[in-house]
Amino acid sequence: MYATLTSIGAYIPTKCVSNKDLEAFLDTSDEWIVKRTGIKTRYFADSNQKSSDLGIEAAKIALQRANISHKDIDLIITATLSPDYINMPSTACIIAAGLDIANVPAFDIAAACSGFVYLLSVAKAYIESGMAKNILIVGAEKVSSVLNPHDRSTYILFGDGAGAAVISATKDKNLSILDVHISADGQYAHYLETPRMQSNENEHNIVQCMSMKGSEVFKIAVAKLTSEVKDILERNKMTACDIDYFVPHQANYRIIKAVGDNLNFKNEQIVLVVEKFGNTSAASIPMAMNILYEEGKIKKGCTLLLDALGGGLTWGSALLRFGGD
Ligand code: COA
């Protein structure tokens, strides 16, 4: 039995925030942000929306496009760095309840921006071992809830959103998730973190904001993402020419460009949505795939190569043929 990705869906919050909007309260400029990151806008969820609300909307679309009933889902996994609650309940449990799915396992994984590739890896293993038949995977992020609005080095980079996919069992290897590789190195844990702190005024007031060593992450990202893609192509006896679309994690235009150039991808093969959405962490790859799908570019059998790096540090790559209609 093989695992195939049969559908993709996404949810984009309605509030669009431009670089100019950020200039009003941060010591930054549209020119600096565009030049250093390629980002022009990002979308922020409303104050009453949680990551699970975004994930539920994305999942509904993915289920409908997979032409599958929510009753057929036998596992739900969510990746998020901005869970609804600290530790419990998991965001996957909230999403399951919102979709009226019960009595199946639901859990979260914490792999930050590599979350979607980690989800694919777990889903592939569950299907190939016969432990599940139809899995809903969701990258759901209200990253704005863990950002410090006074920190210009992080606040400008991120956005909110969600992406979901259905992974099902198939006998057709040609339409399957051909290969997934994930890895991590905790020696870089402090490069990207949301420390759990208690404010002095009120010990129950937990303040959690992201901090990042941007230029250190940048250098590791270019090196790791390049070697990940080289390895997965080599392992599967493919070259850049065999890939229809390269869908990298959307963190920074300069990282994507450097990796794309290192690997000889043509511009038309590289999917770029960072300009519009910013970095939406675990939601970034499925949100990018969703744009391709809605533009009619992803067809059955289309070969996609994904790669990502994020807090942990974690990283990974996936090679798959789209199995949906
Ligand atoms: N607006 C204006 N100036 C800013 C700024 C902002 N938003 N953020 C930082 N600066 C300033 C810095 O203070 C620094 O000033 P100095 O030279 O006077 O000290 C200068 O710009 C250069 O900062 P630096 O951090 O070296 O810039 P950079 O070229 O490395 O770009 C990032 C910063 C964050 C855009 C870049 O490092 C990056 O994208 N890193 C990877 C981040 C990432 O992808 N994280 C998630 C991984 S999933």
Image (spheres, helix red, strand yellow):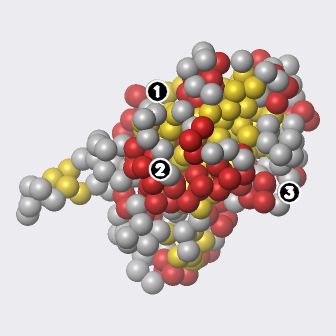
Q: Which mark sits nearer the N-terminus, 3 or 2?
A: 2
- Residue 1, quarter of the rendered image: top right
- Image position, residue 195 (x, y; %): 28, 47
Could you tell me which residue is drawn at 38 percent across and 72 percent down?
Answer: 47
Tell me the distance, in whole angstroms, between the alpha carbons under discs 1 and 3: 38 Å
Compared to residue 276, the image places residue 193 above or below, namely above
Q: Which amino acid does label 1 sit on?
A: Asp
Could you tell me which residue is drawn at 70 percent across and 59 percent down?
Answer: 273
Q: Which amino acid does label 3 sit on?
A: Gly
Q: Which mark sits nearer the N-terminus, 1 or 3?
A: 1
Tell me the distance, in whole angstroms, between the alpha carbons under discs 3 and 2: 30 Å
Quick check: 152 left or right of 37?
A: left
Q: Residue 185 carries which label?
A: 1
Q: Mark 2 points at which residue?
A: 100
Q: Name the residue under label 3.
A: 296
Tag 3 and tag 2, C-beta contact below 8 Å: no
Could you tell me which residue is drawn at 46 percent across and 34 percent down?
Answer: 104
Q: Which mark sits nearer the N-terminus, 1 or 2?
A: 2
